[in-house]
Image: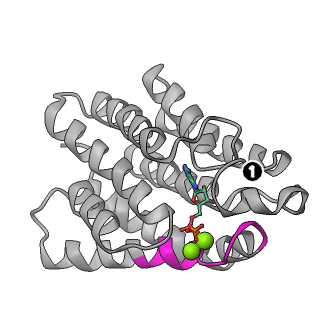
Amino acid sequence: MTIDQARVLRLYAEAAHTAHEALTALDQISGDGDFGDNLREGLDLTVAALDASPYEPAVAVAGSVFLDQVGGTSGPLIGLLLSAISRSLAEEPDERDGWANGVREGLAAIQRVGEAEPGDRTMVDALVPARDALVGGEKFADAARAALAGAAATAHIRARRGRASYIGDRVLGTPDPGATGVALLFWALARVAEP
Ligand code: ADP
Ligand code: MG
Ligand code: MG
């Protein structure tokens, strides 16, 4: 295996610490202010689980942690994403295909459960461009840029899903916290896979 899954998640955890204050501020404007806590807690629990079980496939460990232990709307949705990626990585002989198909499947699962469409101002707005880049065979760095651009573009749209949908214009100018937080996964992946 060339892409070290545990390193991706450890780097994602570091990013969640660095971004914690900013993500909290975004969710204070968009929602109830707990997104930074939810993401950081999920990734800290993941790192602890990886320390305890270093031979388990790391993305599978992270998926279970987010599904079982992380709160908010985002916890179970990120759990669905990570679980789909872990299944795909276990099946696909090619790791890049594994990540690409996993993101495709994970996004589909998130949309089945959450019913968000692109443009609803959710994490879907980061995941759609990331999926398109990966399925199109682009580099992880391009997928990361696409995800971050998708997240940034949510600053210009009113929410139709999640708590932010109750507060209308007040979110304009501020990107969606969940989209921003999910984009950091692709940043970590690109850093580990394409150093
Ligand atoms: P909560 O609103 O329950 O506190 P979090 O703060 O953990 O949830 O996560 C908020 C993020 O969840 C939002 O910024 C958005 O990206 C994402 N989200 C909310 N509803 C949905 C949905 N239906 N589909 C996809 N993502 C969603
Ligand atoms: Mg919240
Ligand atoms: Mg909450």
Residue at 43 percent of width and 55 percent of height: 77
Residue 167 x, y percent position in the rendering: 82, 63
Residue at 49 percent of width and 25 percent of height: 138
Q: Is residue 195 left or right of residue 28?
A: left
Residue at the far top: name it: 136
Residue at 65 percent of width and 47 percent of height: 148
Is residue 31 in the magenta section? Answer: yes
Residue at 77 percent of width and 43 percent of height: 153
Q: How many marks?
A: 1
Q: Which image quarter holds the N terminus?
A: top left
Is residue 49 in the magenta section? Answer: no
Q: Is residue 99 above or below residue 136?
A: below
Camera-nearest residue between 172 and 46: 172
Q: Is residue 138 left or right of residue 163?
A: left
Does mark 1 have its CB less than 8 Å from ligand 1? no
Camera-nearest residue between 110 and 126: 110
The amino acid type found where label 1 is placed reads Ala
The quadrant in which residue 53 appears is: bottom left
Camera-nearest residue between 162 and 94: 162
- Secondary structure mostly seen in magenta is helix
State the residue position of label 1. Answer: 159
Q: Is residue 55 above or below residue 118?
A: below
Q: Secondary structure at mark 1?
A: loop
Q: Give, as a single range, the part of the protein colored magenta.
A: 29-41
Q: Which quadrant does ligand 3 occupy?
A: bottom right
Residue 160 x, y percent position in the rendering: 71, 47
Colour mode of the rendering: one colour
Q: Is residue 119 above or below residue 14?
A: above
Q: Is residue 105 left or right of residue 31?
A: left
The quadrant in which residue 84 appears is: top left
